[in-house]
Image (cartoon, rainbow, N blue to C red):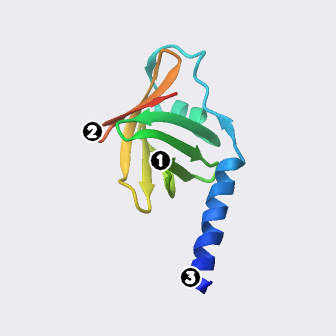
Amino acid sequence: MKNSQKYFVALSCLIFLSFKASAEEVNVSGMPDKQLKGPEVLEVIKGKDLNGTTINGDVQHSFEENNQIFSRNKGFSDSGTWSIEGDQLCIKFRKWEDSCRSVFVEKGKLKLEGSGHTYIQR
């Protein structure tokens, strides 16, 4: 196996293991329906996993304490950074489209809206 193939396999395993070391799932079930403010967004997602659905299917996000994000969709994965800008959750991926989205609690689930897409927690 070539060095580049070994690197790819090692990196893939590392990403896979980061998803397996599951953090606590985002839980907004006790919150009233509302749009979250920046500090609330931070409290709800930092260090947590979020599993949800978009127009592109099921997407899993892991929001690390150090503002790194690891995400999967249909067997593909990407990583990047997340931040709170005003009252929006902003994600900058390495390969996927970057976005900033407003964050809502709706019927006990987290909902992200913006950039022409809606993400609803499962």
Residue positioned 48% across, 14% down in the render: 107
- Left or right of 111? Residue 51 is right
**Mark 2 element type:** loop
Q: Which residue is mark 2?
A: 116
User: Tag 1: residue type?
Assistant: Asn
Please tell me in which quadrant of the rendered image residue 92 appears.
bottom left
Mark 1 and mark 2: Cα distance apart in space: 18 Å
- Find disc 1 in the rendering and name its residue: 73
Kind of residue indicated by mark 3: Ser
Question: Within 10 angstroms of label 2, few (less than 14), some, or many (20 or more) residues?
Answer: few
Whole-percent x and y of residue 97? 35, 54
Where does label 3 land, which residue?
4
42 left or right of 54? right
Q: Earlier in the sequence, mark 3 or mark 2?
A: 3
How far is the residue under mark 3 from the one under mark 2? Answer: 37 Å
Marks 1 and 3 sit apart, C-alpha to C-alpha, by 24 Å
Percent coordinates x, y for residue 23 in the rendering = 69, 41
Going from N to C along the chain, the mark reached first, 1 or 2, is 1
| Residue found 27% across the figure and 38% down from its top | 116
